[in-house]
Image: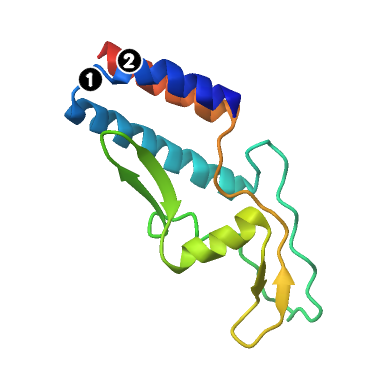
Amino acid sequence: MSDLRTLEAWAGALLSNLEALARRALARAVATEMRRRQGARIAEQRNPDGSAYEPRKPQLRLRPGRVRRAMFARLRTTRFLKMETSPDAAVVTFVGRAQRIAAVHQFGLRDRVNRAGLEVTYPQRELLGFDDADVDRITDLVLAHLTA
């Protein structure tokens, strides 16, 4: 996280000299890249620190022939994983009902399995977050934008 603060301090001074339209274009490029990278990491089922997600618990009665989808297959689509940009910020977030589901898994909260189901404490699976490669990629995008 200190790398992210260092990047913010370094880029903040450089970006303050740009016009709002140029900052918005850079924010859009950063948000697009981060949404792509976050979706790919969710598909790999990896936390930002590189560790694997805790696997699902085994089911008591598994119907024969039933194929289970990968975790968060729909959550990582562009329908639910959105980006918002302004001249001052770039945000990648989940929207709608997916936001609540993502928050339960991101922080390891308690939630109902279905409407009438029992409450379960879900293990923490960090869906969104920065790793060192993300910080390096943002740095590259800022440098490429400033040199262009």
Could you say which is closer to the camera, residue 94 or residue 42?
94
Q: Is residue 61 left or right of residue 9?
A: right
Residue 65 % position (x, y): 70, 76
Task: Give the residue number, with chain letter if any, for mark 1.
Answer: 18
What type is the residue that disc 1 sits on? Leu
Q: How is the image coloured?
A: rainbow
Q: Judge by depth and name the residue closer to the eye, 142 or 55.
A: 142
Name which residue type carries label 2: Leu
In the displayed structure, 48 sits above or below 140; it is below
Above/below status of 116 relative to 41: below
Q: Residue at x 35, y 16 (%)?
A: 13
Dot 2 crowding, Cα within 10 Å, few <14, some 14–19, many 20+: few
Q: Is residue 77 visible to the viewer in this orientation of the structure? A: yes
93 shown above or below 14: below
SS state under label 2: helix
Image quarter of the C terminus: top left
Q: Name which quarter of the figure residue 35 lies in.
A: top left
Q: Position of residue 141 (x, y in %)?
A: 38, 23
Residue at the image point whose x is 41% and y is 60% from the top? 95
Residue located at (32% from left, 33% from top):
27
Residue drawn 61% across the image and 64% down it: 69
Q: Residue furthest bottom?
A: 116
Q: Are marks 1 and 2 in contact (CB under 8 Å)?
A: yes
- Seen as rendered, the residue at the extreme top is 147
List x then y, in percent, for residue 25. Answer: 24, 31
135 relative to 45 in the view: left or right: left
Location of mark 2 (residue): 14
| 45 displayed left or right of 98 | right
| Image quarter of the N terminus | top right
Q: Is 78 in front, or is 110?
A: 110
Q: Residues within 10 Å of mark 1 (few under 14, many from 20)?
A: few
